Amino acid sequence: MDLTAQIEVKALAKEFGKIIINSDKINIFQVDKQLIIDLFKEYGVLLFRGFKAECDEFLEFSNSLSADFMDYIGGYVKRQEINGNPSLLTVNDFSSAIKLHGEMYYQKHHPAMIWFYCNQPPLKDGQTIVCDGKQFYKELSDSLKNLFQQKKLKYPSKLSKNDWQIRYKTENIKTAIQICLDNDLEVKVNEDESMSRVYTCPAVYPSRSQEDLVFINSLLPAQAVNRNLVRFDDDSEISKEIISELNAIAEQITVEINWQKGDILMIDNERIMHGRRAFSDNQRDIYIRLCSLGF
Ligand SMILES: [Fe+2]
């Protein structure tokens, strides 16, 4: 049976992303695995639509293409485990917009790939947004390209005792410090047992093939939360003009995913940045998994 005849592969955007549409009621396990891998490597993000996958099928399908699922220790937002599975998590517990970012780019260990599953779409708004970090880099002015190659980003943060115990899922300060050190964070414990941490990392990385440069980081959401939080590694300010240029590029190259029930999204977290539009209803129920590539 020629299964390629039973799916339709459409462009998600001009230069990245594909939508794999079920056009003949096959199940998701019948889609050719090598085709998925090839499309993923070439286009960076795949949306599987119309396969009516239940959550169990999503788990099995994502297992078949992934390795080393992460449990989100050290993660910034609050996520709940679904059905007691530490590798199946809610997106988060708030409904405001989230600017484009690479997942967990505020620490060394971040997932190479992320999966999204739409258990229930929002009634309105709440689109997941994506952009190509390669394209983002190309759109930067020459002066910003130079600046981001010369200077790294520096994220300072302070966690209260309660906050680090939640973030690192431990009450043991030594364990928490070790997790920070393993993630290349500088860490200092204060008298009140709060923790001051600093993470320094590039804004731009070589692509997986080493052929291109990719703008991928957590700068825009971190900056939206606290304008003075992120600085360059020489402690100079990231000016309003720089942030305006980045936000303008982000909006211009953003692609929205309007969720349908059962949709599965597979994202290369070394190339594609993602985020979310705000929403106001209580229907939106999206899950994520964080992992390495299984191929
Ligand atoms: Fe995220």
Image (cartoon, helix red, strand yellow):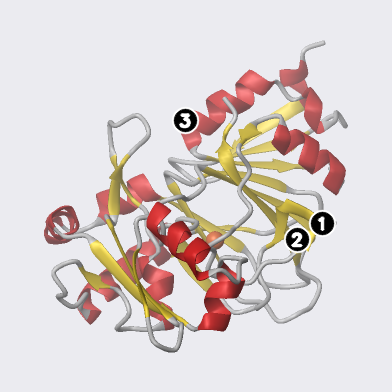
Q: Is residue 170 above or below residue 162?
A: above
| Residue 62, horizontal then vertical, whole percent | 71, 37
In screen coordinates, is 132 left or right of 265? Answer: left
Task: Give the labeled residue for mark 2.
Answer: 81
Q: Is residue 265 above or below residue 38?
A: below
Q: How many marks?
A: 3
Corner quadrant of residue 101: bottom left
Q: Residue at x 35, y 62 (%)?
A: 185
Compute the Cα span from label 1 to label 2.
6 Å
Task: Give the labeled residue for mark 3.
Answer: 42
Quadrant housing the N terminus: top right
- Asked whether the residues under the numbered discs 1 and 2 touch, taking CB atoms below 8 Å apart as contact, a structural biologist would say yes
Whether the residue under disc 1 has CB within 8 Å of ligand 1: no
Q: Considering depth in this image, is 211 or 191 the residue closer to the camera?
A: 191
Callout 1, which amino acid? Gly
Q: Is residue 135 above or below residue 177?
A: above
Task: Give the labeled residue for mark 1.
Answer: 84
Callout 3 secondary element: helix
Callout 1 secondary element: loop
Q: Considering depth in this image, is 44 or 82 the residue closer to the camera?
A: 82
Callout 2 secondary element: strand
Quarter, ligand 1 = bottom right
Q: Considering depth in this image, is 158 or 39 the residue closer to the camera?
A: 158
Whether the residue under disc 2 has CB within 8 Å of ligand 1: no
